[in-house]
Amino acid sequence: MAETDKNIEIWKVKKLIRALEAARGNGTSMISLIMPPRDQVSRVTKMLGDEYGTASNIKSRVNRQSVLGAITSAQQRLKLYSKVPPNGLVLYTGTIVTEDGKEKKVTIDFEPFKPINASLYLCDNKFHTEALNELLESDDKFGFIVMDGNGTLFGTLSGNTREVLHKFTVDLPKKHGRGGQSALRFARLRMEKRHNYVRKTAELATQFFINPATSQPNVAGLILAGSADFKTELSQSDMFDQRLQAKILNVVDVSYGGENGFNQAIELSAEILSNVKFIQEKKLIGKYFEEISQDTGKYVFGVEDTLKALEMGAVETLIVWENLDINRYVLKHSTSGETIVKHLRKDQETDQNNFLDSATSAEL
């Protein structure tokens, strides 16, 4: 999934979590159901059947009907699935109380944008969203190249999972004390072997960190680590792939090579890795303000103007504040039949004047 698509999915889940957390019901008529990948629809259908039998014994008639109604909704929605989708299935259903005190039935079901490793069934007066929050945790993968005079290790880190992709050793000649012509020959040999070592590391870096299908890096960022100046030499070398060069987040000194050096590099880079998203966003905003300060005319802001530019297909990069709470209304003039599009905030939605024609006071 492309980075922009992933960001949109994360935003959708955040918005959904906010709406679900705010919802409240009477009694225990709100069902939260999460099925992990490879779970069986038949198992959950049977469990819901058993739950229906148990709920039939609830003494309060109102609560009993609400719970049975929610279980029936869940059963009906599950019939749409012959099997659990590859990333699992999330289902919320029940009767909620709206802001004006009315009861409203809601059912939300979707396949998460990445595998959800939770199994949940709860009947309560609220929806349980804890497992959805795990979907928001970053699973960005970072590449590590740990390089010293004895060899190189290639590894990745994603969340708390580290993986060694490959390591190889190298036998480089030490600096020689011999004088005369042999000293020059040894120096030349040493430089040649060193050059070949850097080239091999650069070639393997492309092999491990560039996706051949897309020709793009398969990691969110790269950390170069090692003792001595091999890592610096690699980062500045023409042999090092330019696409990876752009992904270097940090160059760190470590006391060891191999796996110990890998662990040390992870520790030393922890702060930078946690701020990657922040740094990316800062860069993006910086670029935007640069356009404004240079008055290039290549920028636009505000809902109306931005959407106009979008409809014209003139937008290259769209920056949206994730807490933007605006709904789009397509309204029809009651007398002329003309279609009017309005974008309203929550507070504007309650103002009836926004749904009247200012000239004729006709309803929209």
Image (spheres, rainbow, N blue to C red):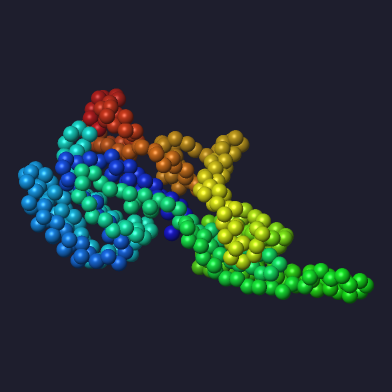
Q: Position of residue 62 (x, y in %)?
A: 9, 43
**Picture quadrant of residue 144:** bottom right
Report whether residue 195 is seen.
Answer: yes
Q: Tell me if residue 279 comes above or below residue 325 in the rendering.
A: below
**Residue at left offset 20%, top offset 32%:** 100
Q: Tell me if residue 259 comes above or below residue 221 in the rendering.
A: below
**Residue at left offset 37%, top offset 46%:** 14
Quadrant (top left, top right, bottom left, bottom right) of the C terminus: top left
**Picture quadrant of residue 34:** bottom left
Q: Nearer the viewer, residue 299 or 50?
A: 50
**Residue at left offset 33%, top offset 42%:** 18
Please indicate whether residue 320 sits to the left or right of residue 78 in the image.
Answer: right
Q: Position of residue 211 (x, y in %)?
A: 53, 66
Quadrant (top left, top right, bottom left, bottom right) of the N terminus: bottom left
Task: Identify the residue at the far right of this view.
Answer: 180
Q: Tell me if residue 195 comes above or below residue 223 in the rendering.
A: below
Q: Position of residue 142 (x, y in %)?
A: 54, 58
**Residue at left offset 18%, top offset 55%:** 74
Q: Tell me if residue 154 comes above or below residue 277 in the rendering.
A: below
Q: Position of residue 241 (x, y in %)?
A: 64, 63
Q: Nearer the viewer, residue 168 or 107?
A: 168
